[in-house]
Image (cartoon, grey):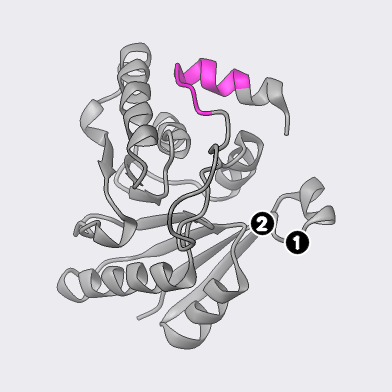
Amino acid sequence: MNKLNEKYYDDLLNIKTEGEQKGFNDSYHYHRYEPTPYSALEILFKQYPLTSSDRIVDFGCGKGRLNFYINYLFNATVVGIEMNEKYYLEAIKNKQNYVKKTRKAEEKVLFFNCLAEHYHINSSDSHFYFFNPFSIKIFINIINNILESVEKSKREIELVLYYVSDHYIYFLENQTAFELKEEIILPDAFKQNPNERFLIYRLAY
């Protein structure tokens, strides 16, 4: 991981998102916090641009790195879901600092302190980001919530998965109408670890 790269973007966005979780969550269903490297986000969004009308939900957002990065680049609405109150409060502080420096609209950066499966899917939510945040059981619950939302408000839906588990892939490809749209690998890291890639799934109608 390029520490200079990490510092450059945190300084640019006026936020603090480095560091890993100390200790572990009470439930094995929820994995530790670790932000997506900025170097990975650079590669992803060069090949996968968003628009200002998109609304992206990040499950297990931690301190909000992905949210601020997307909002800064594309002016899209971003929603961060974080169960850990400490990280949620740090995300809120980051938001205050981010808005102060960038003058971006604060209503387009939202954070909720709740369990991921308890988040009520908004009829405007169009993209959902997962960095291996929890067990397959929780993932299935969330996908079902998304599908229920689509039944009420039909729209284009895409999932962006980083460091995705085989369980997630099997479930999506064998038990849902999601289809693989694109694979974006991280060239240097992928050689050592095949998990270093993004998979983008689109809901087929």
Which residue is label 1 attached to?
194
Regarding mark 1 in the picture, which secondary structure is present there?
loop
- Element type at mark 2: strand
The answer to if 15 sits in the magenta stretch is yes
Please state, as top left, top right, bottom left or bottom right, where the C terminus lies in the image: bottom left
Crowd rating for badge 2 (residues with CA inside 10 Å; few <14, some 14–19, many 20+) = many
Residue 92, image x, y percentages: 31, 27
- Residue lying furthest bottom: 174
The answer to whether 195 appears left or right of 182 in the picture is: right
Q: Residue at x 66, y 36 (%)?
A: 39
User: In the drawing, does residue 82 fall left or right of residue 119?
Assistant: right
x and y percent of residue 57 in the render? 35, 50
Give coordinates of residue 144: x percent, y percent.
31, 75
Q: Residue at x 33, y 25 (%)?
A: 95
Q: Are marks 2 and 1 in contact (CB under 8 Å)?
A: yes
Q: Quadrant of residue 142?
A: bottom left
The number of numbered discs placed on residues in the rendered structure image is 2
Reply above or below: 13 against 122. Answer: above
For the residue pair 74 and 33, the one nearer the viewer reads as: 33
Q: Is residue 134 magenta?
A: no
**Most foreground residue, 38 or 1:** 1
Would you say 29 lies left or right of 105 here?
A: right
Q: Answer with the quarter of the image where residue 97 lies.
A: top left
Q: Quadrant of the N terminus?
A: top right
Residue under label 2? 197
Kind of residue indicated by mark 1: Pro
Which residues are the magenta region? 7-17
